Image (spheres, grey):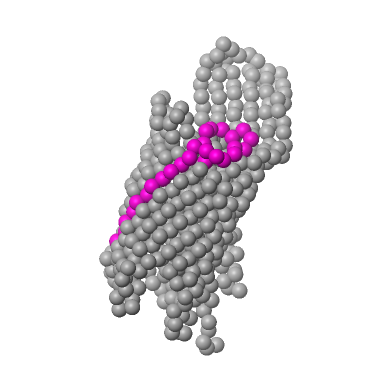
């Protein structure tokens, strides 16, 4: 019962805490908003790589098949803080923001302590996971001054909201091969507002347009993971060199949207009051958008649990997706590459603080999703960080700290230069599904 209460509290806290971002996202009016990638704390500091990364203590959310290698319950929560400078051909804007980035839990259904007590190695393993994180975000506010034949006018553009995803995962491992699936429920709303004011015309004429879209749907991700032991010394996995290969496949799916629109015109006669005329009013208009086919390949090398390197390649087929009603922007295929490495001087877990920490570094580059004037959106950057563990009897607490320096650019239109701090907390508990020997 105590474990069920923990799961319930996890879901409740996640539902309350994962709010919309307060980050300024000038391109979030296009597509389904600015995409939020689902990276694990480890991959946040290794250039967003790690699809084939295997850990017995850490659930790697990049690949649902990694659950099959999990040997201890893993509960994680993450937060990020971001500073950035946004520039275009006319202005420069400095922005800072912070948001909860993920909450997740991975639960192996066979306890590793039972394996030790029974003096045999399990050839089969099962695990499940729960997670909640943002999927996309809309957050911007503009004021545009202009002049027309009717006089000076100002236009305000505002966007808010976003889509979230709740994930339920399962994996099954046989020896060194694991297969997994993530089923995601995507839900949320996107709200766009436009206001036009003619400044120097009497009576004052205002137009206010509000469009809101409520989206929901299911999406599935399949994952495969294989671990190859190159050599095994003294029958100890921690002294072995290993290669691992990963593959994930995101299945194309539909997202259903219900839209509400309220467009109105206001004529302000000052002391005489206002005359309001409804231009357009619609409610619960249904349309469908699509999520694309996604394919990601990864390879990782692990040198005796002391160091490692990994490479990921990904592709998303956005150009073939169907847009929901009034969706803005041209979507194009996206491809990305990420490379990362890690080092842990002391892998016993009981050495001095700086020796038992895992140090991480990586680079990434991706291109696509949005296109304007034949120019694709480009993202690239450098990441680094560390993870430090603290042991408490059968429980482990790991603090993950990552830093990211990056650029997001739509050439000849907009450029974002940012510095991001990722902070994560991981708690491991080895008492789940433990067979009691004595009462």
Q: Residue at x 42, y 56 (%)?
A: 51
Whether residue 381 is situated above or below residue 304 in the rendered picture: above
Q: Is residue 108 visible?
A: no
Is 216 on the left-hand or right-hand side of 283?
Answer: left
Residue 11: percent from the left, percent from the top?
58, 60
Q: Residue at x 44, y 34 (%)?
A: 376
Whether residue 25 is situated above or below residue 300 in the rendered picture: above
Is 370 on the left-hand or right-hand side of 266?
Answer: left
**Residue at the extreme top:** 149
Count the marks.
0
Whether residue 49 is situated above or below residue 25 in the rendered picture: below
Is 248 on the left-hand or right-hand side of 359?
Answer: right
Residue 349 colored magenta? no
- Quadrant assignment, res 201: top right
Q: Nearer the viewer, residue 35 or 331?
A: 331
Q: Quadrant of the N terminus?
A: bottom right
- Quadrant assignment, res 157: top right
Q: Is residue 287 visible?
A: yes
Residue 370: percent from the left, percent from the top?
48, 36
Residue 198: percent from the left, percent from the top?
59, 18
Q: Nearer the viewer, residue 392 or 130?
A: 130
Q: Residue at x 64, y 24 (%)?
A: 207
Residue 199: percent from the left, percent from the top?
57, 18
Magenta range: 318-343
Q: Nearer the viewer, residue 186 or 313?
A: 313
Q: Quadrant of the C terminus?
A: bottom right
Q: Residue at x 35, y 69 (%)?
A: 229
């Amino acid at each position: 019962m105590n474990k069920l209460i923990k799961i319930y509290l996890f879901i409740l806290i996640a539902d309350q805490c994962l709010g919309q971002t307060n980050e300024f996202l000038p391109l979030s009016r296009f597509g389904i908003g600015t995409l939020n990638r689902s990276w694990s704390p480890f991959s946040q500091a290794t250039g967003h790589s790690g699809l084939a990364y295997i850990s017995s203590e850490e659930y790697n959310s990049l690949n649902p098949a990694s659950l099959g290698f999990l040997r201890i319950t893993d509960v994680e929560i993450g937060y990020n803080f971001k500073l950035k400078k946004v520039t275009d051909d006319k202005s420069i804007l400095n922005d800072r923001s912070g948001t909860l980035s993920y909450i997740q839990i991975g639960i192996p259904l066979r306890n590793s302590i039972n394996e030790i007590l029974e003096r045999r190695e399990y050839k089969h393993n099962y695990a499940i996971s729960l997670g909640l994180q943002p999927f996309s975000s809309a957050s911007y506010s503009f004021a545009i001054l202009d002049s027309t034949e009717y006089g000076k006018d100002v236009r305000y553009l505002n966007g808010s909201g976003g889509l979230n995803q709740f994930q339920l995962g399962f994996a099954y491992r046989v020896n060194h091969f694991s297969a997994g699936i993530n089923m995601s429920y995507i839900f949320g709303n996107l709200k766009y507002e436009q206001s036009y004011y003619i400044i120097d015309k009497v009576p004052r004429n205002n137009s206010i347009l509000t469009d809101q879209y409520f989206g929901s749907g299911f999406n599935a991700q399949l994952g495969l993971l294989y671990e190859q032991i190159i050599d095994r010394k003294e029958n100890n996995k921690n002294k072995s060199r290993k290669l691992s290969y990963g593959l994930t496949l995101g299945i194309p799916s539909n997202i259903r949207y219900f839209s509400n629109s309220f467009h109105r015109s206001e004529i302000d006669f000052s002391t005489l009051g206002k005359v309001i005329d409804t231009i357009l009013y619609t409610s619960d208009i249904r349309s469908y958008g699509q999520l694309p086919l996604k394919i990601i390949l990864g390879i990782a090398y692990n040198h005796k649990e002391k160091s490692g390197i990994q490479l990921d390649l990904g592709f998303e087929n956005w150009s073939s997706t169907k847009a929901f009603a009034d969706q803005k922007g041209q979507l194009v295929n996206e491809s990305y590459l990420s490379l990362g490495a890690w080092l842990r001087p002391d892998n016993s877990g009981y050495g001095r603080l700086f020796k038992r920490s895992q140090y991480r570094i990586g680079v990434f580059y991706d291109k696509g999703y949005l296109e304007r004037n034949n120019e694709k959106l480009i993202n690239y950057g450098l990441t680094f960080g560390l993870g430090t563990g603290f042991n408490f009897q059968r429980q482990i607490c790991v603090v993950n700290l990552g830093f990211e320096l990056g650029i997001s650019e739509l050439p000849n239109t907009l450029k974002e230069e940012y510095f991001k701090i990722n902070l994560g907390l991981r708690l491991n508990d080895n008492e789940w599904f433990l067979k009691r020997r004595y009462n």
